[in-house]
Image (spheres, rainbow, N blue to C red):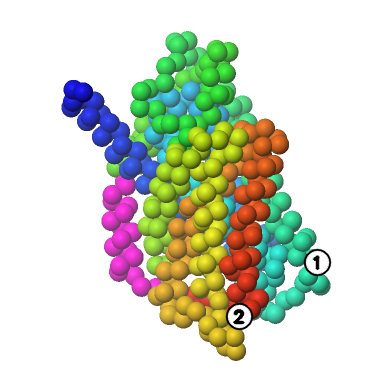
Amino acid sequence: MIFNPVISNHKLSHYIHVFCTFTTFCILGTETRQAITALSTYTPAFVTAPTVLWSNCSSCMLMGIMQSLNAYTWMKDHQVLFLGVTTGYCGALSSFSSMLLEVFEHSTNLTNGNIANHTKLPNRAYGIMEFLSVLLVHLMVSMGSLIFGRQLGKEVIVAYGSSSFSKPYTPPSDTVKENAGDVDTQEMEKNILEFKFKTPAPFFKKFFDVVDKLAYALAFPLIILFVVLCAYYENYSRGKWTLPCLFGIFAGFLRYWLAEMFNKTNKKFPLGTFLANVFATLLIGIFTMVQRGKKHFSTDIPIVNSLNSCHIVSALISGFCGTLSTISTFINEGYKLSFINMLIYYTVSIGISYCLLVITLGSYAWTRGLTNPIC
């Protein structure tokens, strides 16, 4: 085999491009989720806070828009940007594990508010209603947002922001693999065969170029910024705004790697996303148990009883677990599956994840007890 430095340098630059762009969008997605959660936490709120419902809704809508743009070949020259926005930003903005934690806490009457106010359900059977209400609202809002986003992208953005594209479309050689991102190649190929492929107007091309270059350039400055802020400020911001973004980078790449390695093994069951969501739910149950579990049965002192340790655990919960799991990809994958396969995928993912929370967090709560964290 003859070594070709031109090809080698091209691959290296492509990998650096993917790394930097994905890193930037993971940081921004995690920070956006934290900000939306903080903004939606107020009294009196129609949607009980804290919740990731608004984040899941936003990420699924953006995911739907990007799916439509890619299906009509708008993103053919910006596949790395497409990967960053969908798998990176939308994946970090939404959270499957946080949703499951909400389902568990409401169905078992173990929310922070219920514990602080000693609120009880009329009887334990009402936990079933709480389970279904939280779960169905999350899933239906997320699926509705995805469908709305796809139609918004198709009927508004593509319809009014593109010009006809008459040349045959050939994907670039460095196109990101379908298994690694949220790429729907079947819909793209269908539109190509039906001569429905489009090219974006010059304004959108320039916009994509600017966003792509900014994401490429901001990766390392953002990492340095959050490392400095995390080291300098020792207050609540460490657990809420700075550390979660740093943990989110590792979680995002782990989810990306799992999807690339395992999603291609079974087209009827996206194993990579399943493993990421289940593993993140297991971790969030353990971290929540450490943060809120009583150290002794007779006291309300939690296991983690120092402020700095509590902030670190909070960052692991919202940053690592929240970014490792994803609702936007989870809903988008179910949308592309047949109805029966979608039901199987959703039921198995949610069922196993909920059981893991019962085994970890539930068993400790019912034997030792939970209390409110100190941070």
Residue with the mark numbered 2: 368
Q: Is residue 287 left or right of residue 359?
A: left
Residue segment shown in magenta: 218-235
Q: Do labels 2 and 1 touch, CB within 8 Å?
A: no
Residue with the mark numbered 1: 125
Task: Identify which residue is drawn at 55% across, 24% down.
Answer: 186
Task: Identify which residue is drawn at 65% across, 63% down.
Answer: 104
Task: Identify which residue is drawn at 61% across, 26% down.
Answer: 155
Mark 1, secondary structure of its residue: loop
In the rendered view, would you say 289 is above or below 45? below
Looking at the rendering, which quadrant does residue 168 occupy?
top left
Prevailing secondary structure class for the magenta stretch in the rendered image: helix
Task: Name the residue nearer the viewer: 205 or 98.
Answer: 98
Label 2: few (<14), some (14–19) or many (≥20) C-alpha neighbours in 10 Å = some
Looking at the rendering, which quadrant does residue 320 occupy?
bottom left
Disc 2 and disc 1: Cα gap in Å? 22 Å
In the rendered view, would you say 160 is above or below 25? above
Residue type indicated by callout 2: Arg
Task: Name the residue nearer the viewer: 367 or 253.
Answer: 367
Label 1: few (<14), some (14–19) or many (≥20) C-alpha neighbours in 10 Å = few
The image shows residue 228 at horizontal and vertical percentages of 29, 62
Magenta stretch encompasses residue 224:
yes
In the rendered view, would you say 66 is above or below 32? above
Residue type indicated by callout 1: Ala
Mark 2, secondary structure of its residue: loop
Split into 4 quadrants, where in the image is the N terminus?
top left
Q: Is residue 370 left or right of residue 246?
A: right
Q: Is residue 229 visible?
A: yes
